Image (cartoon, rainbow, N blue to C red):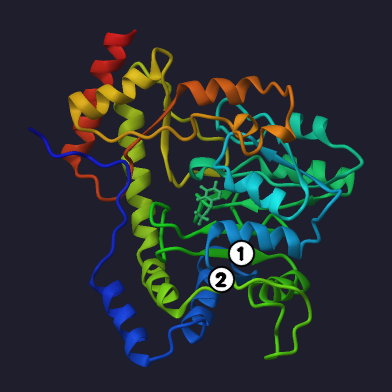
Amino acid sequence: MNDFVPAAKPVIGDEEREAVDRVLRSGMIAQGPEVAAFETEFSAHFVPGRVTVAVNSGTSGLHLGLLAAGVGPGDEVLVPSFTFAATANAVALAGATPVFVDIEPETFTLAPDAAAAAVTERTRGILPVHLYGHPARMQELEAIAASHGIDLYEDAAQAHGASLNGRPVGSFGQFAMFSLYPTKNMTSGEGGMVTAATDEIARRLKLLRNQGMERQYENELIGFNNRMTDIHAAIGRVQLTKVDAWTRARRNNAAFLDANLRGVVVPPVADGAVHVYHQYTVRVSEDRDRFVAALKEEHQIGAGVYYPIPNHRLPSLASYAPGLDLPETERAAKEVVSLPVHPSLSEGDLERIVTAVNVLAQAGG
Ligand SMILES: *Cc1c(COP(=O)(O)O)cnc(C)c1O
């Protein structure tokens, strides 16, 4: 029997372990010099010219980013429904109303026309998601935001290193959040990085993550404890030196799958876009759930479904969207399957994935 090919596999090496040990031995383990260095290195690597603020999770990053950008009660923020619930949760936690917008069928990202149609006088901003590592249509969304005098933000949780026409994700919005959860393209254990378009937003992010304090015990506003620890930052700093090689491996794996899969719709890449393949997501028109079960049980291949229930139909969020119909979102939720694409796949693993998918797609179609 073949070994199981997992859907995701965080890569943690000796360097990460040594970095953690170094911090533990230093005796200073809360937010300190490692976090400061990680912030500087992260912006230099991914979004040169922007200040980056580290927090304890991607979700915290979205939440604080929205608060720092001035989003609050009475505001509406346009979000996709086809994403992880953290996107809309952050809007709701900021006291604002998530307004769900449909996606484009090709890239699964926010549809600019649908976003334009959803703008009201209460819309404060647009929060697209660079889903699966493919950049959203930022140029069109930027134009829509400018024409309505509203803001643009970015959920770049899955898109470290992605770009559009030479511009990196994380450089478009008033703020952008990158997640460092273990299954993302790089990790710090848990963590999030927020890039800020202005010094004012960066300053508010730093206040909000630390009880509203810049100077000890002179709290300026009501804030959280959303700090990253130096232990996590030390892991993230090492991962930052490896992530480009992993991204190349993801892209090579995706190119192999593109060239060899039959009977499923492989993920298109928009003109000018660099896709970093957090997920390699195909569409299956036959019974998707049976397809996923057969990949696992008959072929020992871990496939994921991200996301089977659109946000606007989740019990937690449905009250924001009574009677809403998002046809492309519904169709994607029924059809998507994410195949392993992570950098630890061997050539043999890739061949097994191709054989299994092609056999099952033929049997189903
Ligand atoms: C992972 C993820 C988040 C949340 O990040 P955490 O670090 O897990 O809090 C938000 N949005 C999207 C699209 C994600 O994939």
Quarter of the figure with residue 313: top right
Residue type (three-letter) at the residue carrying disc 2: Ala
Q: Could you tell me if the residues under marks 2 and 1 are in contact, i.e. CB atoms within 8 Å?
A: yes
Looking at the picture, tell me which residue is in the foreground, 140 or 207: 207
Q: Is residue 91 above or below residue 288?
A: below
Mark 2–mark 1 Cα distance, whole angstroms, equals 6 Å
Most distant residue in the left direction: 1
Q: Is residue 343 above or below residue 5?
A: below
The spot of residue 320 in percent (x, y) is: 73, 35
Find disc 1 in the rendering and name its residue. 194
Residue 112 visible here? no
Q: Is residue 192 left or right of residue 89?
A: left
Residue type (three-letter) at the residue carrying disc 1: Val
Q: What residue is drawn where x is 32% and y is 32%?
A: 257
Looking at the picture, tell me which residue is in the foreground, 248 or 4: 4
The answer to whether mark 1 is within 8 Å of ligand 1 is no
Most distant residue in the right direction: 121
The spot of residue 290 in percent (x, y) is: 33, 18
> Which quadrant is home to the C terminus?
top left
- Residue 54 marker: 2
The answer to whether mark 2 is within 8 Å of ligand 1 is no
Looking at the picture, tell me which residue is in the foreground, 362 or 9: 9
> Which quadrant is home to the N terminus?
top left
Q: What residue is drawn where x is 43% and y is 89%?
A: 28
Q: Secondary structure at mark 1?
A: strand
Q: Is residue 292 above or below residue 340?
A: above
Sequence-wise, the earlier of marks 2 and 1 is 2
